[in-house]
Amino acid sequence: MKFNVAVIKGDGIGPEIVDEAIKVLEAVGKKYGHEFAYTEALAGGCSIETHGIPLTQETIDICKSSDAILLGAVGGPKWDNLPGYLRAEKAILGLRSELGLFANLRPALMFDSLSDACPLKPELVEGGLDVLIVRELTGGVYFGERGRKFTEDMGEMAYDVMPYTEKEIERIGRVAFEMAMKRNKKVTSVDKSNVLETSRLWRSVMHNIKDDYPEVEYEDLFVDNTAMQLVINPKQFDVIVTENMFGDILSDEASMITGSIGMLPSASFGEGTRGLYEPVHGSAPDIAGKGIANPLATILSVAMMLKYSFGLLEEAVAVEDAVKAVLEDGWRTADIAKKGEKALSTQEMGAKVIEKLQ
Ligand code: NAD
């Protein structure tokens, strides 16, 4: 089978980690007889350098005509002081809204062999951890009306509006229930309905759709309590579904529980199978160009691409198993190595995964 992949390497460590992920995809193609065609596109800081803006119509068109998009990371200190609409990170928000990517899937999976890197007490994560955070991605406060006003008595005022519609809530809710059906059949819906009107609508829509999934255990949890529960009893969760900003914060918290941010993949979807796949972490400008970045989050993002956009389940599991086997053999990049332990370079880690795949 042949698949078209748009490749956005981006900034910082982006090109280094994406190169390794593509080598893994190529190894999968060779082993299982698939062909992947790549079209490179610019976004973020590198697009600002070339075109003066973080996201061009050309990049959007390339993404729209692909079966899947692989993205490294964008942004860096060089572009931090540009006005908001020119910030490199605007490219990500632009891609999400242009491609209608309303669902973000972030698995927080702790590999047994990396349990040492978990900051929680060992008994809390015994036997590993596997939580899926389903975050709404194109609504809420990140996309609502914002602005500033001058008030006579209190000086300048800033506001960010957090709108949600029934339809937006229902479609993300259904993604969470569908995912739970393929996993451990439990959904925790996170809101702040004791304070926010959007959360009250959120909760009532979730209650309306939960009856369509009688096999799934359902619970509501306030976001502040969820933040607490994630560190005192993370194993109680299977699928957590929540709105954009809560999901942004909780998924970073969940990812740190698993050890290193360099290990965590993510996928974003709209309607249909085209998805955008990227590591959870950013462009890590502090280590860019040194060849020491951990490529595993991006490689695991490719596994998600194989599974969700291409329907290649066996191939996806083969990539995940190869990563697991490399870690079990004790190979580490600097971010997950113990003090004094030998660390592999980005390329060496990529090569180890390919060795196991073959
Ligand atoms: P970051 O995730 O880039 O880095 C945080 C820390 O984790 C750094 O110490 C970094 O060295 C380390 N790290 C991250 N990825 C790693 C990897 N693969 N291997 C080893 N170590 C890794 O977050 P930040 O420093 O807050 O942001 C840096 C830039 O990235 C900013 O411009 C930010 O806006 C941007 N960013 C982009 C995205 C994206 O493209 N989706 C996401 C988050 C942040």
Image: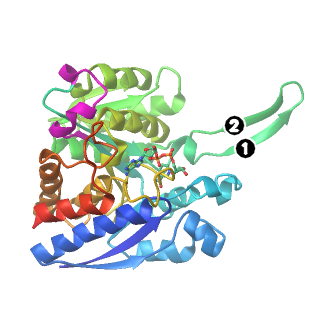
Q: Horizontal placement of 357 versus 70: left or right?
A: left
Is residue 264 visible in the rendered structure shown here?
A: no
Q: Measuring 15% from the left and 52% from the top, which residue is drawn there?
A: 326
Q: Are marks 2 and 1 in contact (CB under 8 Å)?
A: yes
Q: Residues within 10 Å of mark 1 (few under 14, many from 20)?
A: few
Q: Which residue is mark 2?
A: 159
Q: Horizontal placement of 2 versus 252: left or right?
A: left
Residues shaded magenta: 109-124
Q: Measuring 34% from the left and 68% from the top, which residue is drawn there?
A: 19
Q: Amino acid at mark 2?
A: Tyr
Q: Which disc, if any, is residue 272?
A: none
Residue 33 sits above or below residue 264 on the image: below
Q: Which callout, 2 or 1, points at the residue further toward the start of the chain?
A: 1
Image position, residue 179 (x, y; %): 23, 46
Tell me, what colour scheme is on the image? rainbow
Residue pushed farthest right? 152
Q: Which residue is mark 1?
A: 147
Quadrant position of the C terminus in the picture:
bottom left
The Cα atoms of the two marked residues, 2 and 1, are separated by: 6 Å
Q: Is mark 2 within 8 Å of ligand 1?
A: no
